[in-house]
Amino acid sequence: MKNDLNDDFLQRLRTEPSKKFLSTLKANLDRQAISQAKARRTLFRTAILAALFGSSAVAVAFAVLRGSPAARTLVHMPGIGPQSAESKLTAERSGGGAPKSIASAAPGGPPAAAVTGAAAERAPSAVGQSRVAFMVAGPTAIVLNGQEISRRWTLAGSKIQPGFTLTSSTEALAMLCHARLGAPGTGSADIAGASRRILPSELEHCRFNGVTHLAEILSGYETVVLARSKLYGSPKLSARDIFLALAAEVPDPYRPQTLIKNPYRTWSAIDSALLEEKIEILGPPLSSATAAAFRGTLMEAGCTTFPWLAALRQTDSERYEKVCRTLRDDGVYRDRGEKLQEHLETYPNALGLFDFREIAAKPDTFAAATVDGVEPSMNTIVAGTYAGSRAMFMYVNIEPMRGNPAMFSFVDGYRRSVEESWSITTLVAPQRQADARGYLAPLQEMKF
Amino acid sequence: METKELNWDALYAREAPRIYNYFRFRLGSDTDVEELTARTFERAWRSRSRYRRDLAGFATWLFRIAQNIGTDHLRARHEHLPLDAAMEVTTEGTPERDAEQRSNLMRLALLCAALPERERELVALKYGAVINNRVIAQLTGLSESNVGTILHRVVQTLRDRW
């Protein structure tokens, strides 16, 4: 029996599904396709009617308000011209700083108009252009993914669009809770993305400010990978190695509770078990989403292997951020440029910093580093065992969504886009979301 | 646009048995297989107007949906049988082919339960869904050669334990 277990034996374990099952399922799918087509037609008609009705309402309102101070407020909305949303995204910062408001626009479509100031947030961005129906704030991954949905709406002829504010997780949550901790004029958000779960103190802030019904959606994982050319095989590193290789300041080996400027130039200087090779990491600009994710995952994981640095998170969060998330600027980490692949093939010691999806798309070109013995894969990401990954959350204020079908569609579309890998996004490894309405848990049910 | 060129009926006829067997191998039994297969196709059909050929081949896209559904199902199920239980599944005294097949499948599942998650997934994709190593590589993020190497090792392991 033992010798029988081969490819052929294993394939003989297959069986054909019953004809009844296949035909029933097919009939269901055909019915589903027909009802979808009907729903699309209905939606299109509704959108046309809504657009006509909306235009009429705006015209009437304008006529009524003409000459009043309120009308002048609407007419003189500030904008920053035809700068593309994508170019603005590259300016994202992982930490604090003023959030950037972006009205969504399809690539190649009409220019995006930025809207700043709470009073102007929900107003039409320009006569004849999209109406900002609700606001989404968050880090790059969330905003990019949301913009893909917005782009689809635009292509489908929708005039209803979300407004986007690119900002840190903390500020996005503050905007959601109307806490206005961000820069002056930041305004509020109906949906906030975050690379961490909302804190109990933030929830309390929300409650205090009357935002009492939030939904939490685990909306994917942001994952980064260090890799080298496939020619040289997978590097085996620990998170601590990576932190010591790339942090601006590291613990002094002779006085462990003291920080010194990073002296390490070779991997063997960090750990004698590693090769005596020059440390050379090529990655995207520090302002990119991938670099931000790298700082928040692998760097931080390595940093917290030093207990006294991990303790700083509670005692001195500012210093913690600085020590654990600041990359060295002495040339060991540098911009990867356009010829990254050739460079990695030429230099066996060189590593590239990538978004996981880049590596997954080119399995024959790059070999991803294992971190603490765990290789990056869909399974290890979902299991939470790969240190270079972090979960991304979306928080939705349910109250404004009740009377805003577009907002519900956005949340549902976002969920599906991640789940079905449609979007071009840094988010990977979707998880179960049984039903759009099923996962909208009220605030009081959120557990910590 | 491009989706209009796809023959969805033909795709269904081709892929349904593969998805079905993927779940059989993934779960190690026939329980829930029909439901998971139906959920995979319903989700795919619901989104098919948005399927983009330039991002993924149809099988890759469909199996990614199936993987997600399978992972969710397994996560919710949380069944862990001890490896020793494999010894209790007899391969004798089951003259009917179907019964023998079920027995073998269950025995295989019990042995696979001792393997890492990634290797279980590879077995289901390779032998359940009969997908080639190139597509498996796309689905798992491994290289094609790595897929072949791991599968070879896994079959050896299973043979030793059978």
Image (cartoon, coloured by chain):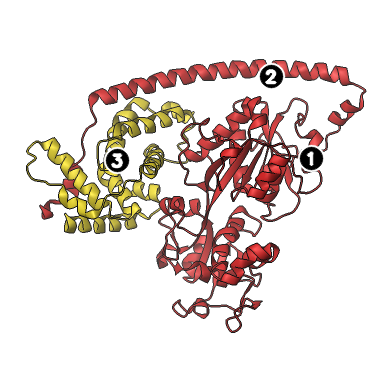
Chain colours: A red, B yellow
Residue B71 x, y percent position in the rendering: 39, 44
Answer few, some or many: residues within 10 Å of disc 3's Cα (few below 14, many 20 plus, some between 14 and 19).
many
Labels 2 & 1 near each other (Cβ < 8 A): no
Residue A82 vs residue A63, the one in the foreground: A63
Q: In percent of the image, x 59 and y 32: which residue is there?
A: A410
Q: Type of residue at label 2?
A: Ala
Q: Name the residue under label 2.
A: A51
Residue A163, image quadrant: top right
> Which quadrant holds the C terminus of chain B?
bottom left
Q: In percent of the image, x 61 and y 82: which residue is there?
A: A255
Tell whether A300 sits left or right of A76.
left
Q: Earlier in the sequence, mark 2 or mark 1?
A: 2
| Disc nearest the viewer among 2 and 1 | 1
Q: Mark 3 lies on which chain?
A: B
Residue B100, image quadrant: top left
Q: Is mark 2 on a helix, strand or loop?
A: helix
Q: In percent of the image, x 29 and y 45: which residue is there?
A: B124
Residue A277 vs residue A146, the one in the foreground: A146
User: Separation of disc 1 and disc 3 at Cα?
Assistant: 51 Å
Answer few, some or many: residues within 10 Å of disc 2's Cα (few below 14, many 20 plus, some between 14 and 19).
some
Q: In percent of the image, x 20 and y 51: which residue is there?
A: B85
Residue A61 x, y percent position in the rendering: 82, 19
Q: Mark 1 points at which residue?
A: A116
Q: Which chain carries label 2?
A: A
Q: Name the residue under label 3.
A: B22
User: Separation of disc 2 and disc 1 at Cα?
Assistant: 24 Å
Q: Type of residue at label 1?
A: Thr
